[in-house]
Image (tube, grey):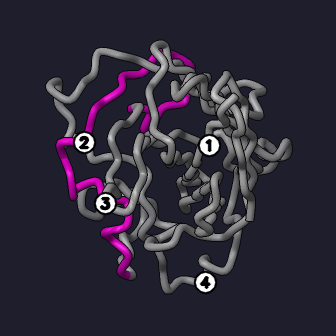
Amino acid sequence: MLLVNSQTANATTVSFGDPTTHWAGWVSSDYQNSHDVLGKPQVTGGSYVVNDGLLSSITFTNDPTWKTGAGWGGLHSGDLFINVKNSADDHYWDYIVRTFDKTAAGNYAIYDISSLNASTDRTDYGANLNTGAGFGQIGPYITAYDRKNQPVAIVGSLLNADLETGETAHFTGLVDDLYSTTYTFNAPLRVGDTWDFSWSQSCGNDVVQNPVPEPGTVMLLGAGLLGLVGYKARRKNRKA
């Protein structure tokens, strides 16, 4: 499992990898939980950029062979979830970038979902719930059928204009010859000393979680038809 330490308050690019098989709290009785990757793409890691507590971008990288073989053309994105202050008393997602079911590059709306409270607790639904073929729903989440019980996006009926922040993030899309996917925040997003994120894409399983409470930790998630990527990062500032 990967530990990531950011030792400066200045602009820092931190890389992360893919050390584990599934996200704790989102388990399944299916054989898949013993597999790191089911289908494609295989997310190999990525990086994020933080400057004095302002998150400016997150990049995910895929194995270069992800576009070989059948089915890769059906790849779509999930939502990007962000919890800006992950702590013992704060288990909830604060924001999403709404890229669910998208492939094209563009600017996509950022929603403040903190008012949904327990509806967006990322560990509430740990039972062995199978949703059948195609997309299903567990609580507020859209799920995929291969990586059973794994969240990939917020159910659209929960989103409304009141939750839009008025800000956007540029998404590079899942098209052409891109072997990485980047979200760039058009207005950098403030995050706390401890924060995390989750992202999904279709036709792949790749799950990473670091349960060690070190100064830097990383989670990547994969989800059946939707490869779910999750991330937890702890940033430690060093005094001059």
Work out how far the residue at label 1 is from the one at label 4, CA to CA, in angstroms: 38 Å
Which residue is label 1 attached to?
236
| Nearest to N terminus: mark 4 or mark 2 | 4
| Nearest to N terminus: mark 2 or mark 3 | 3
Mark 3 Cα-neighbour bin, 10 Å: few <14, some 14–19, many ≥20:
few
| Nearest to N terminus: mark 4 or mark 3 | 4
Q: Residue at x 72, y 49 (%)?
A: 4
Of residue 125 and residue 68, the one placed in the foreground of this image is 125
Which residue is label 3 attached to?
89
Q: Quadrant of residue 171?
A: top right
Residue 31: mark: 4
| Coordinates of residue 124 in the picture (x, y in percent) | 31, 69
Front of the two marks 1 and 4: 1
Q: Amino acid at mark 3?
A: Asp
| Coordinates of residue 11 in the picture (x, y in percent) | 67, 22
Mark 1 Cα-neighbour bin, 10 Å: few <14, some 14–19, many ≥20:
some
Work out how far the residue at label 2 is from the one at label 3, CA to CA, in angstroms: 14 Å
Q: Residue at x 61, y 83 (%)?
A: 31
Q: Secondary structure at mark 2?
A: helix
Q: Amino acid at mark 2?
A: Ser
**Magenta residues, as a range?**
98-127
| Coordinates of residue 20 in the picture (x, y in percent) | 69, 68
Which residue is label 2 attached to?
114
Question: Is 60 a magenta residue?
Answer: no
Of residue 231 and residue 153, the one placed in the foreground of this image is 231
Q: Secondary structure at mark 3?
A: loop
